[in-house]
Amino acid sequence: DAGITQSPRHKVTETGTPVTLRCHQTENHRYMYWYRQDPGHGLRLIHYSYGVKDTDKGEVSDGYSVSRSKTEDFLLTLESATSSQTSVYFCAISDRGQNTGELFFGEGSRLTVL
Amino acid sequence: GQNIDQPTEMTATEGAIVQINCTYQTSGFNGLFWYQQHAGEAPTFLSYNVLDGLEEKGRFSSFLSRSKGYSYLLLKELQMKDSASYLCAVRGNQGGKLIFGQGTELSVKP
């Protein structure tokens, strides 16, 4: 299994508070991704990174920011959480240079915004 | 725009064969992936197609037609543990990112 850990795994917070989710990998993969998964929408890409300090927006990036200061860590921040950001967040990694470049997913972080 | 369509739900019988279809319209194409996701768990990689044709991997096979923007996942000798959501995803031209369909919830009945 790919070495990916997400923290926290569960979080309940209130509207307007900042939240940071952390994704940590031990695979030294170049690409890292944050997805959210909601019923009826499947997995939607929030932001992704193709190297240290290199990030780009996905299809649902509004209200989210990311940072990648080290290869192994990719942080997702909700500056002011809203109820619409209640979701399950998945981090994924890939290395396009090997095999098919498939994504390996972390276990997910369930966020509830009250 | 980008669009990936797959049926929302399917039901099949243990021991049978089921085919889950996926159609896509994306800007650029660098491969199509199928993932399996059990309830409450992370998606896990099943198969990858980048050229037209059939890729077989044990009980699972995946087919791709790039000209038709079409793929299917074929599951043979269904088992109860195959009850899960099956996600179709396409990799475009940018950053290796995958765009996912909504997933097909497969229920396997005895």
Image: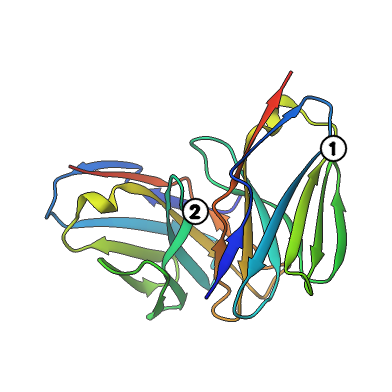
The CA span between labels 2 and 1 is 31 Å
Question: Image point 48% across, 67% down: which residue?
Answer: A32
Q: Is residue A91 left or right of residue B12?
A: left
Q: Is residue A25 visible?
A: no
Residues marked 2 and 1, same chain: no
Q: Quadrant of residue B60?
A: top right
The residue positioned farthest toward the top in the image shown? B110
Which labelled disc corresponds to residue A4? 2
Type of amino acid at the residue the image marks with label 2: Ile
**Residue A9, placed above or below residue A78:** above
Residue ID for mark 1? B76
Mark 2 — on which chain does it sit?
A
- Residue situated in front as seen by the camera: B28 or B6: B6
Q: Quadrant of residue B66?
A: bottom right
Secondary structure beneath dot 2 equals: strand
Mark 2 Cα-neighbour bin, 10 Å: few <14, some 14–19, many ≥20: some
Type of amino acid at the residue the image marks with label 1: Lys
Q: Is residue B18 visible?
A: yes
Mark 1 — on which chain does it sit?
B
Q: Quadrant of residue B18?
A: top right
Question: Image point 14% across, 50% down: which residue?
Answer: A15
Secondary structure beneath dot 1 equals: loop
Mark 1 Cα-neighbour bin, 10 Å: few <14, some 14–19, many ≥20: some
* Residue B103 position in % (x across, y down): 58, 49
* Residue B28 position in % (x across, y down): 64, 80
- Residue situated in front as seen by the camera: B14 or A21: B14
* Residue A100 position in % (x across, y down): 71, 67
Badge 2 vs badge 1, beta-carbon distance below 8 Å:
no
* Residue A74 position in % (x across, y down): 38, 65
